[in-house]
Amino acid sequence: MRPELTNDQRPYLGLRIVEPHWQREEWLPNMVFYHDETAIRKIVSYFTSKGPDAFSEADYDIELTPEKLMRTASGRGKPRSITGSNVEKYRPTGYRFFFDGATQFSAYTPDFSFISLKARGVYNSWLDAARWLDGFIARQPVDYPQQLTARLHTPIPKISYKVGDVVAFTLSNDSGYGFCRLILDINRLRQTSWIQNPPGYTGGYHYLCRIIGSLMMAEVLKIQKTVPELSTEELASAGRYPPLLLSDYYILNGCLPIVAHQKVEVEQLHQLPQAFEPLYQNGPRGYHYQWGIASIIVPEDEMLSRENEKIMSEWTHHVRPLADINSESFFFHPERHFYLSAGQDEVEERDLRHSRYQHLRKTILAKKGLPATTSYDEFSKHFGFPTRQKIVNWQNSLPPSCGEWKWW
């Protein structure tokens, strides 16, 4: 039996219920149409290539002729036959359940929220997803369907941003708040010759290209338990914590409100814990860069706790992408060091701390006129990369509920 939502579940996902007078037809393979005498009201689509029990449900208002042809949205032009490509021309409001999570989409706003079911270790089948959904519904206030409907049908005003803007973010509903300043728009830099082949993710959902949005680097100015106020001195100071990577989507849809602006000087870019400056020349291939990622880990047996669920959902929505993993929840943070060469077809992932790549460190050190015996911490200090102690200090400054910081 193929999965399908119930009328009890639909309002909590922003979907209309199936009315008793609607007819149910499977006019196309793997597509179930709910319609009345005048219009298609709902379509359930099944995607066998996207994983077990993968499907989507979306609400439509596609007018039908008596011959069951689709009228154009503008009312002009000849009616179209019901085909998959013609249906795709309409923007619905709905929900997708794929192997990698659940995605909500709306025809009225640019709202695009991602709830990772796989990261919670529960989405192996629709029964697992339904169990998660029942728990999700049980935690919501009584008027949640009304709140969701209002949000999905309220257009969000256009928001513009620029490097130097300071945005506020929430670590989770009650574990911490902070401010960060946008210091690099990586997606724009990648259009220039300065960064010919920037680093990218292979396991997450954000990439350094126009998929979800422009990827931004932001320096964190302040984090604390209570709602913080940002003083003039703190606004002008350098970031005290490792930078964040975030998509401009969260700024454009209002999740990260812009609260101030402070011009970013070129000199500040060379003081980052990681930089895009060339470490040494590599012939015609271009520069090598230093990059990094680290992670905060939530053990599998703690994933479904209320507190960690808040962290996982809020941090994912407001701060950073969530990796595609099985037994642990990784929150990407730019700290693990990669060794990259611009112009390569594939980015090589090499941790310069590992003895296996000691010769690479020696080469870089030699090019900079430093002794080959320079320790990794000394190497990090020289190039502005974070030392172990800096990571420990940053970890100690976080609220206890943020999980364990793992130094790779």
Image (cartoon, rainbow, N blue to C red):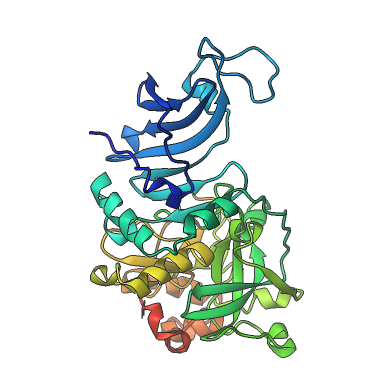
- In the displayed structure image, the side of residue 237 where residue 205 appears, left or right: left
Question: Residue at the spot x=43%, y=89% of the render?
Answer: 396
- Furthest toward the front, the residue is 20
Depth check: 154 or 393 in front? Answer: 154
Depth check: 312 or 149 in front? Answer: 149
Question: Residue at the spot x=58%, y=72% of the render?
Answer: 169
Residue 95 lies, in percent from the top left, at 44, 44
Question: Residue at the spot x=42%, y=63% of the render?
Answer: 140
Q: Quadrant of the N terminus?
A: top left
Residue 220 lies, in percent from the top left, at 59, 78
Tell me: residue 274, above or below residue 103. below
Tell me: residue 26, above or below residue 129. above
- In the displayed structure image, the side of residue 185 where residue 280 appears, left or right: left
Counting labels gives 0
Residue 349 placement: quadrant: bottom left
Residue 229 lies, in percent from the top left, at 66, 86
Q: Quadrant of the C terminus?
A: bottom left
